[in-house]
Amino acid sequence: MKNSSQSQKELKLVLASKSPRRVDLLKMTRLPFEQIVLEIEETSNEKSIVKYAMDIANKKGMAVIPKLADKVSVVIAADTIVVLDDDIFGKPHDYDEAFRYMKELSGHVHNVITGVCLLLADKNKKILKKENFYSKTNVHFNNLDDEDIRDYLDNAKFSDKAGGYGVQESGITLINKVEGSISNVYGLPIDMVLVKMKTVLKTYMGKEVRLKKVFTA
């Protein structure tokens, strides 16, 4: 797989996500990237919670492969879930479900797990390398009464967020402690993604790379 002759500025970085939080996190790296969004059924037969999240991330990544430009591309796909006592809290279908999620999370420590899939594809859209991994963060929720929950839900966009809350908005006031990657709670463990990306590209290019010198806009 090594390609030491690979010139600079030939690779495309693709984010396979419609999440504005993941877009914002990747923008912070100042790496040029494009966004490709395809709707998939976010379900998995995996019994392990970690494998469940990684499987959905894998499906998201694989779905965009046919849509890639005719260039060597690195695809980032992710799926974030909230877990309390082995119960998965996905995106709430409505206000009542979001309220129930918040009620159950109140006063407890839950896990935020993001499964990530990194794909390296050649210009013919052949998969050269795949890396699946995950990040887990422990989130300590404050004790919330019904009025606290309604006040949050009445003023937040909760329908597109696992567990019905987002730390980037007023959801930060619901939390008293975070153990682990804070960017993971936003939806993408960006530090881990960058490390894994360098490893994938080193395998492909046969040398250490500086990410800011590799990707083309």
Image: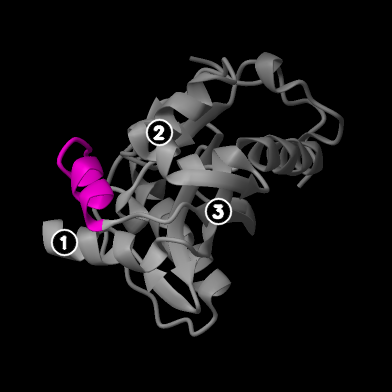
Q: Mark 3 or mark 2, which has the lower sequence index? A: 2
Q: Residue at x 53, y 51 (%)?
A: 126
Taking 156 as reference, is 111 above or below it? below
Taking 88 as reference, is 210 above or below it? above
Taking 159 as reference, is 52 above or below it? below
Residue 128 horizontal/vertical position (percent): 63, 51
Element marked by disc 2: helix
Task: Report how far apart the C-alphas of labels 3 and 2 lie in the structure.
Answer: 18 Å
- Residue under label 2: 21
Q: Is residue 120 rendered magenta in the image?
A: no
Q: Amino acid at mark 3?
A: Val
Along the line of sight, which residue is nearer the eye, 26 or 16? Answer: 26
Q: Amino acid at mark 1?
A: His
Residue 11 horizontal/vertical position (percent): 58, 26
Along the line of sight, which residue is nearer the eye, 107 or 100? Answer: 107
Q: Mark 3 or mark 1, which has the lower sequence index? A: 1
Q: Crowding at label 3, few (<14), some or many (≥20) Cα neighbours within 10 Å? A: many
- Residue under label 3: 139
Label ID, residue 22: none
Magenta-colored span: 146-159
- Residue under label 1: 93
How was this image coloured?
A: one colour
Q: Amino acid at mark 2?
A: Arg
Q: Mark 2 or mark 1, which has the lower sequence index? A: 2
Residue 163 horizontal/vertical position (percent): 35, 58
- Quarter location, residue 72: top right
Residue 174 horizontal/vertical position (percent): 42, 44
Between circles 3 and 2, the one closer to the viewer is 3
